[in-house]
Image (cartoon, rainbow, N blue to C red):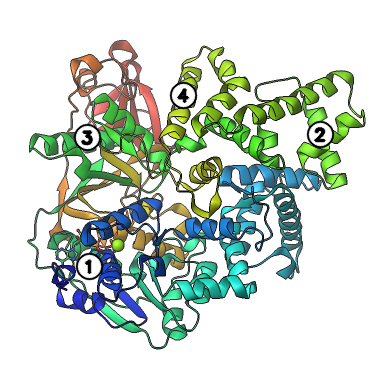
Amino acid sequence: MDVSYLLDGLNDKQREAVSAAEQDMLVLAGAGSGKTRVLVHRIAWLIQVMQHSPMSVMAVTFTNKAAAEMRGRIEALMGRDVRQMWIGTFHGLAHRLLRAHYKDAGLPQSFQILDSDDQLRLVKRTIRALNIDEKQWPAKQAQWYINAKKDEGLRAHHIDAYDIAEQTHKQIYQTYQESCDRAGLVDFAELLLRAHELLRDNQYVREHYQRRFRHILVDEFQDTNAIQYAWVQLLAGQDNRVTIVGDDDQSIYGWRGAQVENLQHFLRDFPQAETIRLEQNYRSTSTILNAANQVIANNSDRLGKDLWTDGHSGEPIRVYAAFNEQDEARYVVSSIQQWLEQGNALQDVAILYRSNAQSRVLEETLLYASIAYRIYGGLRFFDRQEIKDALAYLRLISNRIDDAAFERVINTPSRGIGDRTLGLIREASRDQKLPLWDAAKFLVRENLLTGRAKNAVQGFISLIDTLEDECIDRPLSKQTDIAIKRSGLMAMYESEKSEKAETRVENLGELVSATESFMPTGEEDMSPLAEFLAHAALEAGEEQADEHQDAVQLMTLHSAKGLEFPLVFMVGVEEGLFPSQQSMGEPGRLEEERRLCYVGMTRAKQQLVITHAESRRLYGQEQFHRKSRFIGEMPPEALHEVRMQTKVSQPAAQRGRFHSGASHETFEQTGYQLGQRVLHQTFGEGTVINYEGSGAQSRIQINFDEKGSKWLVVAYAKLTPL
Ligand code: ATP
Ligand code: MG
C-alpha cells in the first residue's frame, strides 16, 4: 500500500513523529510549527499503516470546534469516515463516559449538565439555605473554590479545614454537592472528577476502556489540569501508548487550574517516551516570529525551544497609539477597509482582545461601517434567558428531579407563585431530603399551602405532567414547540412588545429550528432530547449561525489558541489591561500574561497590528494607561509606529445608526484636534483625547497633566491651543 501521501507536506522531524513506532511521545514545539498537523497525520498513520481500528484511538482537543476540524482533516486525508473514533474535549469525552456508565457513576439516567451560570445560582441558594452571610462569603468565590477543589480531584470530605474560610467553603461545597446529587445535576468540573472516579474505582469499566483505546493523543497538553492528567494516566494503563503535543510557552490557563508541570510529569510518568522537537515555524513572517520570540524570551523557567522560519520577512508590525477606544476602533476598521480594497477576504481577519468587555466599541464601529463580524465566546445562543427558560421546561419534562430547572420555570411566566411559597417548597425539600418537585407535591397533598398558592402550585404540576403526555413519541422539534407554546413562554414574550422581547420571540423560533436540524447520534442510548440538552450545555459558544458568512472574527486572546489568520489585530495592549492590573504585582501571573501575548502574536500569518489607547472607558470607568511593556519588549526595528487621523467611511443607508462619538468633520468644527496640547486657566496643560456633539453643544475631553481627564463644553472652556 502506498502511504507516502501521509508523509507528504511534512518536514523530516514531523515525519519522524508521524511514522514513529508505537510508543509514548511528547512533541514539544513552539507556535505554528505543525504540532496539530502532526497529530492529524499521526492518527491517519495509526489507522492506515498500523491497521488500528478508529475505535481504538482517542484524541483530545481543547475546543469542540478544534475536534470537529480535526475529524474533518483526518477524514479528508484518509478518504473514509472515522465515526467510531472518540474525539472531543475532556469535558465532552467525560460526559460520554458518564452517559454510558451512569449507574456505575452513581448518577440517574436522566442526569443533566449544570452550566456555570446555573451553578452559581445553586451555590447562592446553598449559601442562603445555610444562613451564611453572602456579603462575607460571596457566591462567586465559593463557586471558584468548589471548582478548584474538583479540578484537584478533591471531594469535600478530603479537605482538612483549618481556618474559618476553608471551613465555610467546605461546608458550602458539601451542601451544594448534596443538592446536585439529589437533583441529578453535574457541573463541568464534576464531569471530569466523576469520570475520573469511575475509571479509578471501577475495575471493569477501567479495563474495558484500557483494552479499547490503544492510542491516546492529546493536543494543547500544556493546559491540562491535574484531574485531566490523572484521566490520561488511568486510560493509558500499562499497555497503551500516549502522544501529547504542547508548548510550555503557550500555557495560558494557569488561572483556571491548568498545570504546565504536567509536561514534566509526563516525562517522569512515561519514562519510555521519546521527545520530538519541531523547530520550523510555517505560519508567520520572520518579522512576526522574531518579535514573538523576543517577547517570550523575557520569561524565566522555560523549557527552551528554538523556532525559526525560512519565510520572508513581510511587513513590519504596525503599532497604533490611539487617543481612546473609539479612535482605536476607527483605526482598526479603516485598516480592515484597506485590506478589503486590496482584494482580501474578511474571514482572514481576527481582532483579539484581553477581555470580552472590549468588544462592544469594536462591534459598534464595525456595524457603522457595515462590515460583517462574528464573535466567538460572547453570550452563547444557549445562554440567553429565553433559551434557558425553554430548555428548563424540556429538562423538567424529562427529569422531574432537576431542581435547577424547577426553580427557573416554576414562576416563569408568572403564575402567582411568590417567594414565600417557593421558600416553603425549598424548606420542605431540605427537611424531607426531597427534590423540589416532590416537595411541591407533598405540600399540595398535605394541604400545607394557602388556597391560592396551592392552586397555583397544583396548576404548575399538572402543566408539566400534561406537557409530558403531549410530548411522548413526538419528534424533538415538536416537543420543543409544544413546551414553548403550552408553557406560556412564547405568549409572555409576545405580549411584551419591546424590541428586546421581539428578539426573544425570534430566538425561541430559532430554538425550534435548531432542534429540527439537530442530528442525534444515538450514542450511549441517549434520547434525542437528552443529546440535544447535553449539546446545548457543552457547546462552548464556538459554533454560531452563519458559520460560512464572510466575516471578521472577534474573540479573546484566550479563545484564539490554536487558530491562525492572515491579518491579526491585538487591541488594548496597555499596562493595566494587558498585562492585566491583577497580574502586575505577581511574577507568575505576569509571565502567564506574557505567554498570552506570545499566543496572540503567533496567530498572525502575514500582518500583525497592535493598538493601545491613551484613555479608555471600560467597565464604566475612564482609565489612563501607558502602552504595554510587551510592546517595549519587541525589537524596535520590527515595529512601525502609526500616528494618523482615521476616518471610517460609511455607506449612506447606515447613517444615523451610530451613536458612539461624532465624526471627524464635526470635531474639526470645534477647532481642536485629537492629540492637540492645550492650556486651561484652572486645570493647566493637557491633551485633547475625545469629543462629542456639535455646534454649541460640542464637548471635548482633555487629559490634564495634573488634574486628570475632564469633559468641557468647548464654547465655555476658554482653552488656549499650545
Ligand atoms: P499552535 O502552537 O499555534 O497550535 P501548531 O504547532 O499546532 O500551532 P499547526 O497549526 O499544526 O501548528 O500548523 C501551523 C501552520 O503551518 C498550518 O497552516 C499548517 O498547515 C502549516 N504547516 C505545518 N507543517 C507544515 C509543513 N511541513 N509544510 C507546510 N506547511 C506546514
Ligand atoms: Mg496547534
Q: Which residue lies under the disc numbered 1?
A: 33
Q: Earlier in the sequence, mark 2 or mark 4?
A: 2
User: Mark 3 or mark 2, which is nearer the start of the sequence?
Assistant: 3
The residue under label 3 is 333
Element type at mark 4: helix
**Front in this rendered view, residue 541 or 486:** 486
Task: Mark 2: give few (<14), some (14-19) or many (20+) Cα within 10 Å.
Answer: many
Q: Which residue is mark 4?
A: 509
Q: What residue do we see at 28% from left, 21% from top?
A: 662
Q: Are marks 4 and 1 in contact (CB under 8 Å)?
A: no
Q: CA distance from mark 2 to mark 4?
A: 31 Å
Q: Specify the amino acid type for callout 3.
A: Val
Q: Is residue 239 above or below residue 711?
A: below
Residue under the point 59% across and 22% down: 489
Q: Are marks 2 and 3 in contact (CB under 8 Å)?
A: no
Quadrant in which the C terminus is drawn:
top left
Quarter, ligand 1: bottom left
- What is the CA distance from the residue labelled 3 to the residue labelled 1? 30 Å
User: Marks 4 and 3, Cα distance to the nearest angstrom?
Assistant: 33 Å
The x, y position of residue 276, in whole percent, is: 27, 80
Q: Secondary structure at mark 2?
A: helix
Residue at horizontal 35%, vertical 83%? 23
Decide: few, some or many residues near mark 3? Use Cα within 10 Å; few <14, some 14-19, many ≥20: many
> Rounded to the nearest whole Å, what is the CA distance between mark 4 and mark 1?
44 Å
Residue 82: % across, % down: 33, 59
